[in-house]
């Protein structure tokens, strides 16, 4: 018996010795200013976006050979899963060296919790105040202090379509896009008659809210949409405009695929358009890379012949934007590494490497347009000329708590019969959310 | 305790070595990050260092040759760990649920029972969760018990290849709920028309079109009832194993006696086997019930966060990590704990009583 116990102790000692022996060999030297690991947290794991990140990392590792990039990406749901993981790490006092955050209210939540630092010096040193558009700088700053480094600009209000399906059903899109949702519904009736799904939709994770915001913006227009989110709110959540928007949303749902809630993410819904099962899909312009990039990360389709795009109905001169940005944390392990990463993310070379692959346009205004796809070149022109409004789904206009509450009410509506009574319930819930979770001052 | 102290030099040397190695390891791993690739070994190193050091103390304690002291010393680390990591955190969750904590920074301002009040009075989503949990729990337990008992009785007929069948029936239990949720979401795809697929497709190919249905997207509560299918598929084999063990432990003498008295096989099951299986049923209900009351993974994989299939676990995750509403998330967590406790505690109390009687 006692022999066995001694044997056990011997094993423990052996294990401990081996651990302490192999520990130092496998350990890089502790982070000094000269280099170390830079752990960057994002939700860029999908086709297109992962390639863009890899291209930017290549530049980073060439410019800073002493720094080692550690990719801490988490998949799924337009970042909702990643944010949950990040929240636990921040709560545990173990922040990554930088993380991806949607520019706007999403970043301010971290700033208000004193988890990230202002970047005034960094902006001055890299001369960023003159290369980012003024409208964008206003949205990423609190009292004039910028809190994040935007890498890209995405457009939310893009409607992708299959020209062959439209042709077969005898539908033509007016130049510049459908002027209103009722025009779009008339086209949908023709497509339905031709035996196809008019509007493909993905699961409730974020694609339903993405559709909802585009229906609302197409109905309300740019000014009234922005007025929903100001303090105090200048657009009445209980008003007739919102009511009409919700009615349009209910009608739009009646043209969607019956298995929307069972699809795994947004890609299968976009693929329905590529496969010719559906005519239209409303998704941000990250879908361009999915359609056009070569396999295995894309469908290798030809623009204008296999797929095409138009602004969502009622948003011809509106640019609904979102922007991915990186932040400078408080109390991370390698602060110099973070600044090095931010320098690459903000640089012309970094953004020119990242954005063509991601299918977004540069946050900087001085990128070489020849590097970009035809779609992105058009988007860059619209970004310069259109009315700019922020996306709700992608956390530009509202704080996370408000957005989550709207999402719950939206899902309750999706589970309902979508009739007038359900629309009224949805609208009063939205008005209540504005008071309890939003600005508080709501008409 | 000093009466039986026996000094053994080898043990003393062992104790000193263990404590030295332990403290060296603690010193090495504290105050720096030790990583192999991206895997952080710091906590593991500290844990092992601490345990090795404690091993040295145990060796010294063992020299006193007092069993009570030694057993207390052996149990102490687990007792401390459970006290902190289970009961300490339960207490902390209760405290958070009574606070106003919303946002990324802790806020322990007292809010009384308002989180609980709001969940039951102003929150349509939580009421959906309660109803869905009730439907799922009842369907899951009844399904597993009926199918499990049926399979056990079939296997009890001394048929050839019994162990093969037992393996087949038990096999689904080895699959994680996430994986089976993904697969069953494909099988139970509710799409109709051109996009027909999964089991509905099989029905169509067999010309059984009247069986094609919407599965878990049916109007409630029937939609939720369909989510029971994968859960029962996974755990009815486990229930079968419990019952089969119970049946096999019933002495053959009883059956023989009943047969001599003229009982039919059915009567033997009805009046002898089933009543004697009652304790097994109770255990099965408790094991299955505590799983279904805190179900999360299966529903998340199956329902893709469709609110019609929402359960408290999903709501807790949403409100805590997406809306940063930690107080409400903690309140939902505490309610889930209470619901499981209502099921488990009476059983534990009864068990302890019977054990003391023995």
Image: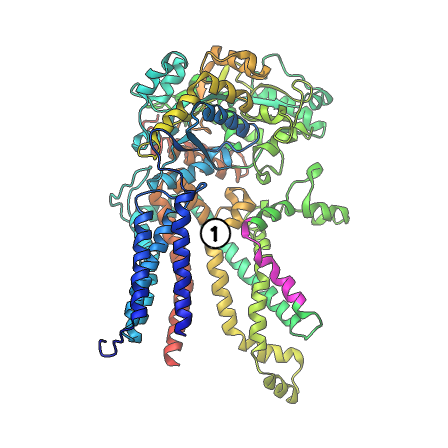
Q: Which residues are magenta?
A: B164-178
Q: Considering only vertical position in the picture, is A207 above or below A145?
A: below
Q: Residue A227 in the image: state x and y as whole percent.
A: 39, 21
Q: Quadrant of the N terminus of chain A?
A: bottom left
Considering depth in this image, is B235 or A194 the residue closer to the camera? B235
Considering depth in this image, is B42 or A248 the residue closer to the camera? B42
Indicate whether residue A436 is drawn in magenta: no
Q: According to the image, label 1 marks what residue?
A: B131
Majority SS type along the magenta span: helix
Q: Residue B294 in the image: state x and y as whole percent.
A: 46, 54
In the image, is A280 to the left or to the right of B221?
right
Q: How is the image coloured?
A: rainbow
Q: Considering only vertical position in the picture, is A274 above or below B64?
A: above
Residue count near mark 1 (Cα–Cα under 10 Å), binned few <14, some 14–19, many ≥20: some
Indicate whether residue B174 is drawn in magenta: yes
Chain letter belonging to callout 1: B
Q: Residue A331 in the image: state x and y as whole percent.
A: 31, 34
């Amino acid at each position: 018996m006692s022999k066995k116990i001694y044997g056990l102790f011997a094993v423990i000692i052996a294990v401990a010795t081996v651990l302490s022996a192999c520990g130092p060999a496998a350990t890089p030297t502790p982070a000094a200013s000269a280099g170390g690991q830079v752990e960057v947290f994002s939700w860029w794991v999908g086709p297109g976006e992962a390639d863009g990140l890899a291209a930017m990392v290549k530049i980073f590792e060439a410019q800073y050979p002493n720094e080692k990039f550690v990719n801490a990406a988490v998949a799924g749901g337009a970042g909702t899963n990643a944010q949950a993981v990040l929240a636990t790490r921040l709560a545990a006092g173990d922040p990554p060296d930088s993380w991806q955050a949607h520019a706007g209210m999403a970043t301010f939540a971290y700033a208000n919790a004193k988890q990230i630092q202002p970047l005034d010096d960094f902006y001055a040193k890299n001369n960023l105040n003159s290369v980012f558009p003024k409208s964008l700088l206003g949205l990423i700053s609190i009292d004039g202090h910028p809190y994040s480094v935007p890498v890209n600009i995405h457009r939310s209000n893009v409607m992708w379509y299959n020209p062959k399906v439209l042709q077969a059903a005898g539908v033509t899109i007016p130049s510049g896009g459908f002027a209103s949702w009722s025009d779009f519904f008339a086209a949908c009736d023709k497509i339905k008659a031709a035996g196809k799904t008019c509007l493909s939709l993905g699961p409730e994770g974020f694609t339903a809210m993405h559709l909802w915001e585009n229906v609302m913006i197409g109905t309300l227009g740019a000014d009234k949409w922005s007025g929903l989110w100001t303090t105090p709110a200048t657009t009445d959540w209980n008003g007739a405009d919102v009511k009409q928007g919700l009615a349009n949303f209910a009608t739009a749902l009646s043209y969607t695929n019956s298995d929307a809630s069972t699809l795994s993410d947004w890609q299968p819904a976009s693929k329905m358009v590529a496969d010719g099962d559906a005519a239209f899909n409303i998704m941000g312009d990250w879908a361009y890379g999915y359609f056009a990039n070569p396999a295995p990360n894309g469908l290798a389709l030809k623009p204008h012949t296999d797929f095409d795009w138009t602004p969502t109905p009622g948003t011809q001169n509106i640019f609904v934007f979102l922007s991915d940005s990186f932040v400078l944390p408080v109390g991370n392990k390698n602060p110099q590494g973070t600044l090095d990463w931010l320098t690459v993310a903000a640089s012309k070379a970094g953004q020119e490497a990242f954005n063509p692959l991601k299918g977004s346009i540069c946050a900087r205004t001085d990128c070489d347009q020849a590097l970009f796809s035809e779609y992105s070149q058009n988007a860059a022109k619209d970004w310069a000329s259109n009315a700019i409004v922020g996306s709700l789904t992608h956390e530009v206009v509202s704080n996370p708590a408000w957005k989550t509450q709207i999402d719950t009410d939206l899902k309750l509506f999706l589970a309902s019969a979508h009739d007038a009574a359900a629309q009224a319930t949805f609208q009063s819930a939205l008005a209540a959310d504005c008071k309890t979770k939003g600005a508080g001052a709501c008409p | 305790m000093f009466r039986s102290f026996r000094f053994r030099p080898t043990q003393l040397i062992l104790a000193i070595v263990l404590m030295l190695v332990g403290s060296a390891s603690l010193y090495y791993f504290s105050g720096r990050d030790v990583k192999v690739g991206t895997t952080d070994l710091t906590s593991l190193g500290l844990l092992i260092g601490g345990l090795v050091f404690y091993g040295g103390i145990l060796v010294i304690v063992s020299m006193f040759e007092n069993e009570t002291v030694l057993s207390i010393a052996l149990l102490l680390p687990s007792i401390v760990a459970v006290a902190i990591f289970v009961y300490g955190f339960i207490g902390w969750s209760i405290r958070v649920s009574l606070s106003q904590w919303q946002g990324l920074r802790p806020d322990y301002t007292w809010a009384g029972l308002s989180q609980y009040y709001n969940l039951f009075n102003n929150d349509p989503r939580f009421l959906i969760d309660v109803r869905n949990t009730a439907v799922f729990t009842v369907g899951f337990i009844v399904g597993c018990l009926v199918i499990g008992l049926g399979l056990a009785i079939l296997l009890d007929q001394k048929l050839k290849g019994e162990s093969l069948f037992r393996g087949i029936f038990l096999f689904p239990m080895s699959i994680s709920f996430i994986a089976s949720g993904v697969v069953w979401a494909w099988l139970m795809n509710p799409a109709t028309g051109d996009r027909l697929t999964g089991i509905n497709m099989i029905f169509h190919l067999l010309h059984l079109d009247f069986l094609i249905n919407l599965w878990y997207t049916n109007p409630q509560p029937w939609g939720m009832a369909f989510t029971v299918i994968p859960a029962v598929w996974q755990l009815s084999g486990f229930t079968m194993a419990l019952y089969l063990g119970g049946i096999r432990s019933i002495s053959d003498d009883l059956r023989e006696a009943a047969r001599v008295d003229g009982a039919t096989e059915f009567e033997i099951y009805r009046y002898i086997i089933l009543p004697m299986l009652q304790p097994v049923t109770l255990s099965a209900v408790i094991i299955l019930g505590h799983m279904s009351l805190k179900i999360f993974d299966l529903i998340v994989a199956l329902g893709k966060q469709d609110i019609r299939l929402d359960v408290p676990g999903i709501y807790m995750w949403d409100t805590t990590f997406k809306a940063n509403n930690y107080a409400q998330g903690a309140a939902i967590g505490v309610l889930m704990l209470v619901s499981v406790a209502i099921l488990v505690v009476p059983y534990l109390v009864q068990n302890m009583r019977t054990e003391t009687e023995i």
